[in-house]
Image (cartoon, rainbow, N blue to C red):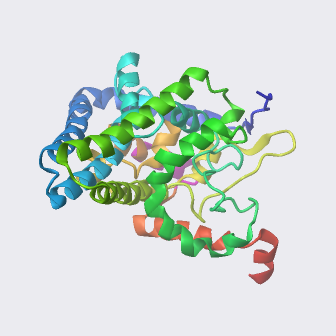
Amino acid sequence: MEKVVKLTFARSANDLIFNSIKQRVYAKVKELEPARQLFITLKAILFPLLYIAAYSIALMYGNHTLVLDMCYCSMGILLVIIFLNLIHEAVHHTLFKRKWLNQLYICFFDLMGANSYVWKIRHTRLHHNYPNIMGWDSDIEQSDLARVFPHGEFKPYHRYQHIYLPLLYPLFLFNWLLLRDFKDYFNKKKVIWKVVSIPGQEYVKLFLWKAFFLFYIFILPKMLLGINWLQMVVAFCIMIFTGSIFALLVLISPHASVENEFPLPDENNMMQHTWLMHQLSNTNDVNEDNWFTRFFMGCFNYHIAHHLFPNVHHVFYPEVTAIIREEAMKHQLPYRSYPLATALFNHYRLLKQNRMPADIFEETM
């Protein structure tokens, strides 16, 4: 693998401010941890059981089309819920104190069709370290169909991306589960190859897990229920469509927005901002906060807290965010939060803004 010079962030007095924030946050987490541990354990048990239950009902009563479709719809939603509340935490080692238990839950991602090996690297080593930086943030740099970065390569069809991309978004999980993972493994131009060479054994796991996913999603129900392939394909599409829409409400809102920055490093691979300022300039929260977002959605609306404190479980994010908001106001740091509808519209504005080359766009403003 060709040696790549990693990016570095500027240093300033903001580093001392962040140290002060960390002290307050960790003290608050220590205070709340005994009472919140019950919710962490409850979700770790409940959500996988609900996924297994939905699948089991599909196997027993799926010869009724409505039951099959409802079960697969539930599995699509539960896939995202498990990802947000369990897998996402396990990959940051915040779900359990024991490393092997976290690793066990990460394997649940493979069971649900994704590849945990490449996603862990994409998420923890690339997205978290370099959010919104072209050539480094693999969570945003996913497909040539989308020109999310304002300085990204322009292709003629990007003129219409604000029209066709929202129509393609329901296929998001189809692309992730059945296409993107293979591209990351076999296309060495992908961002992930900047930080890792994929071991041979992971290629074996990739194919084995994908085959098992397709077996239990398609073949086993077909064998046991005696239904036709069209019914299975429709049920799978329902699972993918509902899961994709549910997932994108979370994944689109905090970063890929016209209100967030997409900075580039200088010729020495140095970023203009400090790490703290970079995270605050490229991430926003979502205003919505209720029992549903806290229990089922993994507190996705508190995304700044997650980026600043990925080693803290999401059940603490409401209190952590209160500290961040207070310190940001005190030190005039750019903390931002929008209603969900506004955050999604800001993403649409970004697609529309980046549909033309930057110089042409500026001339037409």
- The answer to whether residue 333 is visible is no
Tell me the residue at 30%/39% (across/down). Answer: 216
Q: Is residue 113 above or below residue 106?
A: below
Percent across and percent down for residue 48 are 25, 36
Q: Would residue 213 appear left or right of 7 to someone viewing this image?
A: left
Residue 330 in magenta stretch: yes
Tell me the residue at 46%/43% (across/down). Answer: 305
Quadrant for the N terminus, please: top right
Q: Would residue 206 appear left or right of 103 to someone viewing this image?
A: right
Tell me the residue at 56%/46% (across/down). Answer: 180
Using the image as rendered, state which of residue 280 and residue 173 is in the foreground. 173
Using the image as rendered, state which of residue 34 and residue 175 is in the foreground. 175
Q: Is residue 99 above or below residue 274?
A: above
Q: Main secondary structure of the magenta part?
A: helix
Tell me the residue at 58%/73% (across/down). Answer: 162
Residue 19 is drawn in which quadrant? top right
Q: Residue furthest bottom?
A: 364
Report the label total.
Answer: 0
Residue 73 in magenta stretch: no
Q: Is residue 315 above or below residue 238?
A: above
Percent across and percent down for residue 57 are 15, 45
- The answer to whether residue 363 is visible is yes
Quadrant for the C terminus, please: bottom right
Residue 319 is drawn in which quadrant? top left
Using the image as rendered, state which of residue 223 and residue 69 is in the foreground. 223
Segment colored magenta: 322-335
Q: Is residue 1 above or below residue 334?
A: above
Percent across and percent down for residue 125 are 60, 33
